[in-house]
Image (tube, rainbow, N blue to C red):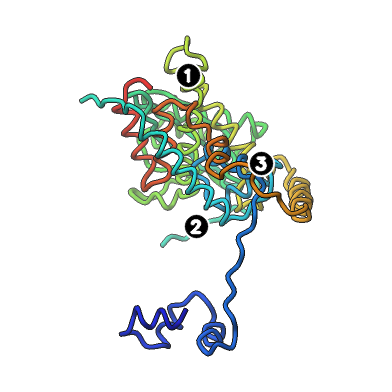
Amino acid sequence: MLDSLQNRFQNLLLRQIYDAGCHSRSQLYQWHKAILDRKARASKILDERLVEDTARVISDFPHFGGAKGQAYMLYHGIGLIGQKAYDGTKKKVKRVLIQEVSHRDLPQTCNAYDHIQPEGIGEIWAEDFTQLAVNGVRFKVAILIDVFDQYILGWSVSRRATEGLVAVPVQQALKANGGRPPTKFLLEDNGTQYVSEGHQQLLKAHEIVSRNIPACTPQYNGSVECGGKEFKNLFYNVWERLETNHTDKEKSLDERVHRAIEDTVHLDNFQIPRPALGGVTPADVHLGLQQQRQKDIVRYREEQEVKKTSKPLSRPIWDVIKQGVQAELMSTKEVLTKLAFFGMRPLRRIAKINQEVRGN
């Protein structure tokens, strides 16, 4: 390997190649002196059912990387797959979606911070609102989370960002917490809805200490900013699946968006494990089930590791991937939405699709 690198980069000294390598200096030296044979590692054979289930998870949540995808599958008992194998399968899912959309008639378009970290549940809350673009209509979604475990305590949606919109999550959070305010403070930005007299009176009435971040510094409220991004990632996948399945088609757009947000919040709180929380969901931490769920996951992982060697695939790998993705059952808009997560700035692409695309 070192000989090939020296031939390709003749202007580099051997020590520079050592420094740039991802392997240890001693290992590179032994390869260079032919002291140690570099053996190619045989790729592990994956079970056919596991590949299909993995492809299905990637299809449902295309924004998952290897770590989060592995955690999700372990949490729900779907199977054990390595993080690299997950990412490799994700590349194949991307190709399946590209092939699927390539023969579709595409729709036409119309014209340095000192942060106070909570040490337990209920110490610090954070609130903010984000924007969703659905069928050419913009919706505002206000979210209030517990910073310790990213658990969504309250939310509301409207076409306009008003005082009433941001008041509802506070009231829901108080109800979920038995009427008790956060023990430290509520973090919020300087949006007009949050600094308004009405909202501040609501906080004072419930003895909530508010702490406003400086202007134009969203990193001060990073927990809810990241939570809002994850919420949007989930929402667009949930929304397109409900629309493809014609769920609640007889209802108005506002009612369907409300239903999709309800499902998204449930997924975010109860179904999506977080590697930062030890591979469990925010609800597990919030409800005190973290240790038991972690034990269940460890036991399941050990069971998967001692399973017998997987049998060779009985079908071509692409047939297995396609069966897991089931892209042919998706609407064109759903395929485009999921495909956006395989590129840069997916939420911007999805917002553009929802502003411009008419129909499915």
Which residue is label 3 attached to? 49
Depth check: give the residue in front, 98 or 146.
98
Measured from the top left, where is residue 329 in percent x and y? Answer: 50, 26
**Mark before the other along the chain sequence, 1 or 3:** 3
Q: Amino acid at mark 2?
A: His
Indicate the quadrant where residue 39 lies: bottom right
Residue at the extreme top: 250
Q: Is residue 12 visible?
A: yes
Disc assigned to residue 115: 2
Residue 209 makes an appearance in the image: no
Residue under the image location 42 percent in, 32 percent down: 335
Q: CA distance from mark 1 to mark 3?
A: 34 Å
* Residue drawn where x is 51% and y is 47% of the image: 90
> Circle 3 sits in a helix, a strand or a loop, which is it?
helix
Percent x, y of residue 82: 62, 55
Q: Nearer the viewer, residue 168 or 42?
A: 42
What is the distance, in whole Å, between disc 2 and disc 1 at their CAs?
Answer: 38 Å
Q: Which residue lies at the image location 54% right of the left edge and 45% below the top edge? A: 185
- Residue holding disc 1: 256
Mark 2 vs mark 1: give the one in front.
Answer: 1
Give the mark, 2 or 3, whose residue is nearer the N terminus. 3
Residue 319 location, x and y as percent? 55, 39
Front position in the image: 286 or 301: 301
Mark closer to the observer (2, 3): 3
Distance from the alpha carbon under mark 2 to that under mark 3: 45 Å
Left or right of residue 345: residue 149: right
Check disc 2 and report its element: helix, strand or loop. Answer: loop
